[in-house]
Image (tube, grey):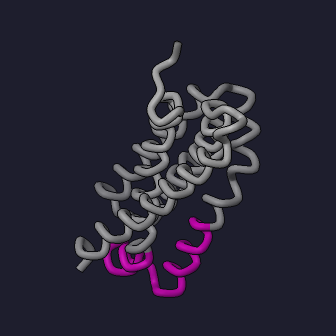
Amino acid sequence: MKKTLFGFEMTFWTANGVELFERAAYYGTFIALVIFLTNVVGYTDIESGWIGGLFSALIYFLPLFTGAIADKIGFRSSLIIAFSLLSFGYFGLGFFPMRIAVLIFLVAIALGGSFVKPVITGTVAKSSSEDLRAKAYSLFYMTVNIGSFTGKSIAKPLRT
């Protein structure tokens, strides 16, 4: 018998924890991205706006493809790829704020984040029973919103 908490397997709660931190990292980065690109990296306001917009577009467009890849290679391998890319990207942004390098790191973050989205959503579906599915997705989206709020709330005082 699998261990459960409030009727959900531990896999469900782990997936929600992963989503919480991934969303906090994304929104925490996104809130300061254009300022970082302009003031630290040296892009113009217009270039920074375009880069920020393209970064956001990639993170929501790429899951169409990374979801198919994740189905093919499996959730575990996909998460390893995702966290490797996210670690590379976030570490690189922090330590190598050079014009071309930052673009590479942002693409890595977008790719990593786009693997997380379909894998975690699929994990929520697989780790919840049919009768608890609606509750599972409600908890999942609540976690997304908490991650978003937390990431923005922590990043705001840090950027000033």
Numbered-mark total: 0
Question: What's the residue at 70%, 59% (across, down)?
Answer: 61
Question: What's the residue at 46%, 46% (across, down)?
Answer: 86
Question: What's the residue at 36%, 63% (across, down)?
Answer: 150
Position of 87 relative to 58 (above/below): above
Q: Position of residue 141 (x, y in %)?
A: 56, 56
Q: Is residue 50 in the magenta section?
A: yes
Secondary structure mostly seen in magenta is helix
Please tell me which residue lies in front, 2 or 76: 2
Q: Is residue 69 in the magenta section?
A: no
Please tell me which residue lies in front, 51 or 19: 19
Q: The C terminus lies in which quarter of the figure? A: bottom left
Q: Position of residue 5 (x, y in %)?
A: 44, 32
Q: Which residues are magenta?
A: 34-56
Considering every residue shown, the one lying at the far top of the view is 1
Position of 54 relative to 110 (above/below): below
Camera sees residue 84: no
Q: Position of residue 78 (x, y in %)?
A: 59, 33
Please tell me which residue lies in front, 115 or 132: 132
Camera sees residue 134: yes
Q: Position of residue 21 (x, y in %)?
A: 40, 50
Query: Image quarter for residue 118?
Result: top right
